[in-house]
């Protein structure tokens, strides 16, 4: 047998590729080494460690990448509980709650509220109607007030302003925070400011001490003004709460909100063609890639689900989808609440483009591709068979709903 040490090009390539499933096994783990001053240093990142706030820190050495150890350790971590038994004041937040859940904009707003509340104040979240959110505690909510009733359902801005005025009379918050968005917060905040007779600070993206900075001049300039009581904040105005767990104690109004005679009548939702929705504004995107072999079946599935169609760059370059349907850093950055990737391996540019999506579902034959690692739910199998089963399931569900309605 030859004693010559031969190179293994494949092993060297895996050692350089951090996204490869076997990358961690190829990395030598150095637990200690001699420092420049002769002191033995220890690599605390080599085996992972728990930070001062009880959070599992990222293992940047690659020793645990791709393994189940990191997920198990993260699940066992119990975040420290932040309690405010007797709040000195309140910071009220009115999240948009699109789809009944906290959006990334709402979480940024709660992070700003936690920053303003400090250690003595409490963050009071005011939610209208029924919701599906169960993570108020980890989002930074100390007190939760849910205003339910038929009067607050649908599009009822005048009635909601009446509810906010009742909250203002009872809790007298130091600051009101609403998202300056097109999904309700911007309009509601300005109506509420007019009802209170106060001038709000709009498009605020940063708060420093007793000063808030907002966008002006078509977003090209910054406008600094004294910290207002009513703040309409933009997205990414602050870091979301991630290192503490809050009580989210339910509170109630001491008085009932009288139903006012609304001058606005809500005629219900209007059906919109999903294909006419711009990619950047779509909330449900059904995207296809190189793994899709039957594009007619792909279009049928998107129509059955009522989703906006998207595509990877490969599918667009091959002519299966239009250029304006391309998702990714070289196409359109999307913020969908649900993003379904069919036959998309997950190039880095595509993963960057879907970074702000809430839930990602991946359908792929390769269980080790990067899209599977990014997805919240993965389905491994042939895309054609899965899409046919999905269409059948949707039709069965709708037929059952029709029978129940009849």
Image: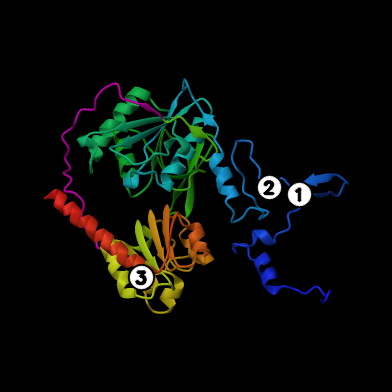
Which of the labelled discs sits on residue 47, or is there none? 2
Do residues under tags 1 and 2 come within 8 Å of each other at their CB atoms?
A: yes
Disc 2 crowd, CA 10 A, few/some/many (<14, 14-19, 20+): some
Residue 352 is situated, as x and y percent measured from the top left of the image, at: 50, 61
Q: Is residue 347 left or right of residue 292?
A: right
Mark 3 or mark 2, which is nearer the start of the sequence?
Answer: 2
Mark 2 or mark 1, which is nearer the start of the sequence?
Answer: 1
Q: Is residue 241 visible?
A: yes
Residue 291 is situated, as x and y percent measured from the top left of the image, at: 43, 72
Q: Is residue 209 left or right of residue 252?
A: right
Which of the labelled discs sits on residue 31, or is there none? 1
Q: Nearer the viewer, mark 1 or mark 3?
A: 3
Label 1 and label 2: CA atoms lie apart by: 8 Å
Corner quadrant of residue 389: bottom left
Which of the labelled discs sits on residue 384, or is there none? 3
Image point (31%, 41%), residue name: 188
- Magenta-drawn segment: 249-277
Position of residue 232 relative to residue 221, above or below, is: above
């Amino acid at each position: 047998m030859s004693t010559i040490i031969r190179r293994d090009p494949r092993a060297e390539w895996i050692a350089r590729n951090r996204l490869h499933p076997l990358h961690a096994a190829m990395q030598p783990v150095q637990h200690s080494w001699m420092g420049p001053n002769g002191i033995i240093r220890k690599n605390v990142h080599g085996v992972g460690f728990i930070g001062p706030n009880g959070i599992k820190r990222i293992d940047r050495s690659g020793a645990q990448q791709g393994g189940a150890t990191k997920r198990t350790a993260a699940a066992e971590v119990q975040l420290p509980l932040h309690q405010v038994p007797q709040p000195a004041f309140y910071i009220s937040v009115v999240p948009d709650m699109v789809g009944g859940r906290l959006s990334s904009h709402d979480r940024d707003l709660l992070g700003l509220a936690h920053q303003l509340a400090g250690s003595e104040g409490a963050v009071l979240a005011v939610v209208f109607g029924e919701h599906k959110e169960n993570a108020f505690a980890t989002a930074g909510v100390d007190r939760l007030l849910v205003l339910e009733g038929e009067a607050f359902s649908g599009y009822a801005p005048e009635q909601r302003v009446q509810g906010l005025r009742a909250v203002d009379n009872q809790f007298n918050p130091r600051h009101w925070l609403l998202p300056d968005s097109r999904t309700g917060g911007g309009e509601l905040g300005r109506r509420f400011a007019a009802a209170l007779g106060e001038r709000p600070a709009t498009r605020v993206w940063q708060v420093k001490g007793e000063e808030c900075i907002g966008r002006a001049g078509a977003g090209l300039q910054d406008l600094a003004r004294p910290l207002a009581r009513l703040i309409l904040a933009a997205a990414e105005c602050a870091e979301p709460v991630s290192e503490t767990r809050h009580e989210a104690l339910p509170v109630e109004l001491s008085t009932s909100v009288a139903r006012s005679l609304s001058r606005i009548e809500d005629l219900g939702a209007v059906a919109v063609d999903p294909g006419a929705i711009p990619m950047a504004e779509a909330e449900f995107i059904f995207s296809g890639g190189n793994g899709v072999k039957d594009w007619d079946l792909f279009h049928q599935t998107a129509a059955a689900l009522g989703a906006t169609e998207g595509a990877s760059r490969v599918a667009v370059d091959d002519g299966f989808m239009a250029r304006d349907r391309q998702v990714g850093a070289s196409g359109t950055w999307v913020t969908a609440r649900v993003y379904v990737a069919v036959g998309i391996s997950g190039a880095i540019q595509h993963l960057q483009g879907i970074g702000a999506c809430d839930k990602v579902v991946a359908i792929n034959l390769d269980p080790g591709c990067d899209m599977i690692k990014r997805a919240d739910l993965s389905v491994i199998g042939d895309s054609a068979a899965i899409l046919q089963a999905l269409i059948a399931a949707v039709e069965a569900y709708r037929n059952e709903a029709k029978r129940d309605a009849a």
